[in-house]
Image: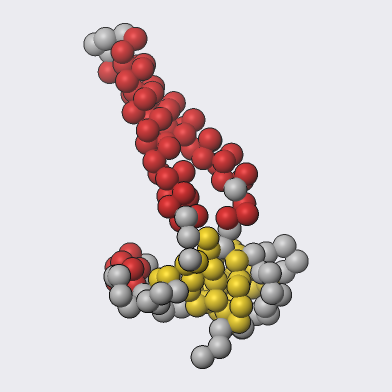
Amino acid sequence: MMLETRAIVVHKDNNSTLVEASGASGCSVCEGKGCGSSKVTQLFCNKPRQFKVDNRINAGVGDEVIVSVVEGAVLRGISLVYLLPLVLMFAGASLAGGWIEGHDGYAAAGALAGLVVGFVIAKWLSRREARQQPYIARLFQE
């Protein structure tokens, strides 16, 4: 199953295409009406947002399109960006703090180092998984 949402192409050049998501978002099963994903979107994203997507169908500026993303890509992206740095931050704090007991500064430095290493690894891994990027699947037709 693919996660899909409607969007409008707002900018296009040789290298990138920007779309602005419109209305409720959700998967193709309920289109944001059943599981509550549209309510979460309304709660946290109250203004339109623009996203860079792969334009496989060569849609033009002003076209209303369906943007798709592979089902597991969102969860993998969240894990990569948030979970990996957090785990490495705690690991760095416990390792550095365990070496010299009683010095919280070492634990804080270890936490900061783990966090930075986590973000660097996440950035490197996200470049390797560029094929997971959202793409324009088709033009929207009512």
**For this view, does 63 lie left or right of residue 7?**
right
Toward the left, the furthest residue is: 102
Residue at (54, 68) in percent of width and height: 68
Is residue 50 something one can see in this rendering?
no
The correct choice, above or below, for 68 with respect to 132 in the image is: below
Q: Nearer the viewer, residue 63 or 107?
A: 63
User: Where is residue 14 shown, x and y percent of the image?
Assistant: 75, 66
The correct choice, above or below, for 86 with respect to 73 in the image is: above
Toward the right, the furthest residue is: 14
Residue at (34, 72) in percent of width and height: 38
Residue at (36, 17) in percent of width and height: 95
The correct choice, above or below, for 80 with respect to 9 in the image is: above
Residue at (71, 75) in percent of width and height: 58
Toward the top, the furthest residue is: 100
Colouring: secondary structure
Locate residue 11: give its quadrant: bottom right
User: Where is residue 63 shown, x and y percent of the image?
Assistant: 61, 83
Q: Nearer the viewer, residue 41 or 138?
A: 138
Toward the bottom, the furthest residue is: 142
Is residue 5 something one can see in this rendering?
yes
The count of marks equals 0
User: Where is residue 26 shown, x and y percent of the image?
Assistant: 40, 71
Locate residue 61: give its quadrant: bottom right
User: Where is residue 83 shown, x and y percent of the image?
Assistant: 39, 41
